[in-house]
Amino acid sequence: MAFNDVLESLGGVGCFQILHTILLLVPVAMLSCHNLLQNFTGAVPEHYCKLPSTSDLNNQSQRHIMKHFTSLDQEHKPWRCVQHQKAPDLLLNSTDKLFEGKILEYCKEGWTYDRSIFSSTIVTEWNLVCNQRPWRQVARSIYMTGVLLGALVFGSLADKLGRMEILTWSYLQMGIAGSCAAFLPTYDGYCAFRFLCGVASSAISVNSISLILEWMPKRGRTLAGNFFGFSYSLGQIVLAAIAYLIRDWRWLQFAVSAPFLLFFIYSWWLPESARWLILRGETNKALKNLRKAAHINGKWREGEKLTTEMLCSEMQKDIFIIRSSHSVFDLVRTPAMRRMSLCLVLVWFSSNFAYYGLSMDLQNFGLSIFLTQALFGGVEMTAKLMVMLVMTFVGRRVMQFVSLCLAGVMVLSYGFTPHDMQMLCTVLAVTGKAFLASAITCMYLYTGELYPTEIRQTGMGLSAMNARLGSAVASVLHLAGDFSETILPMLFGITPIIAGFFSCFLLETKDSSLPDTINEVEERYRDISFEEEEAEREQWIIKIHVKEIS
């Protein structure tokens, strides 16, 4: 019997699969906290130049100094980055005419920050405002660079060393690096350890979805894949709640990092993928893990009947074909793999480029930053529940195309809507982000089903790498400054639409078994091509008969 039949005989979607999926999805929820953490730890509060020492003066004298020390902008708020140039000893005796026509200068003594929302952020810690403001986005870009590198490195390593080896190490790395970043005194140290968090983030993401899919029978894969995206959105709501309760950035950073040490401890219980072990020739370990799953599912008799010979018989051909090592070049070496990989690269890049482009600055929406984050997460969860149902009936390819195109339309509409129509802008942005989240959820499941087992992690790693490349590019565009209120939404809207059309060139995987080898993928594409040719011949024959009759 096939491997899917083995899983079905051992309980199908039983207690083991449910518990296994939950234990892998809880870290994914906390992972979203890290990806969007700097919306809170890097929030920019209201600020203005710090006044000279006036502790011995009454409030009226301080207001008098403030009046002449700086000016108000169009919103009647003090200038953030400049002050009037004047000698400190003239402050108390100054008159309105004294400072008329005075030269402006940058804040000399630092800034005074509004601490009514956050007691501290990395911005207030290291004065990342005014001419130092780009360093705030640099910190985010460094994290995304780590995610990019982790996707490339750990994707290939997981195919060679195993999913659980890499996942367990990544939990430990995330827990230690994230906790260290919370209490380092320097900006450089903070960025270095956030980079390590980014590296671990990719490994956790791609290995979690692969383990979920490889332990799940065919009939449960759609549900499990969608719960993967569902947990990510739930994590956004959790982040909003934690950030609301913890307003100090250091303790907030620690609060979302420390749980990964707990995940590291219980990850030793989680079994390696039996499918991967069989293809690597480690059938005894695979048999042990399958019997463990069978016992938890209450199918211990069926588990005891399994033998290594039974496991190898169906997959003997694949074990013989599989090579001892694979590289990223195997993803583009053959025609079908090349076509599939290029389409997935574009889809992953575009959707994450737009998704994180909208997610990176919640302060621009005019609502409470906590409410905006929770709203994004709540709407995404609703959209993903709908995807969970729709994708079961219409398939992955249709869902991917529709969600990307609708997301692009919503984001483009948001870009051309006047910003004084705040409510409409928020609705369009939230709806567009919900469709992008739906597309990303579909992609995780879709990509895992398209790539064969022998190189699935390498393919997932390449996909995740391009996803993080998209988010890094979005971060760099934010870093370039607010050069236009329309150009960025246009870019974030056009790219998903283009990606949606490219997704039409991918195979439908609904109700299909997972491919195990590259040869199997090539055969599926050849079968599709043959069917298309046969359909074209039938159409030509019908046209010829119609002409003869007429």
Image (cartoon, grey):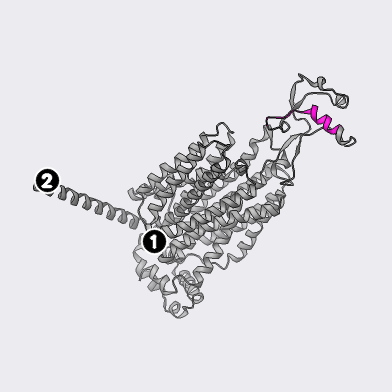
Is residue 190 rendered magenta in the image?
A: no
Q: Seen from this angle, which residue lies furthest right?
A: 56
CA neighbours of label 1 inside 10 A, class few (<14), some (14 to 19), many (20+) = many
Q: Position of residue 381 (x, y in %)?
A: 53, 56
As shown in the figure, which amino acid type bears the numbered disc 1? Leu
Q: Position of residue 497 (x, y in %)?
A: 42, 42
Foreground residue among 135 and 436: 436
Residue 310 badge:
none
Q: Which residue is mark 2?
A: 547
Q: Residue at 56% of width from left, 53% of height from top?
A: 377
> First in sequence: mark 2 or mark 1?
1
As shown in the figure, which amino acid type bears the numbered disc 2? Lys
SS of the residue under disc 2? helix
Instruction: Please state the extent of the stretch shown in magenta in the rendering.
Output: 61-74
Residue 514 badge:
1
Foreground residue among 436 and 431: 431
- Mark nearest the camera among 2 and 1 is 2
Foreground residue among 467 and 354: 354
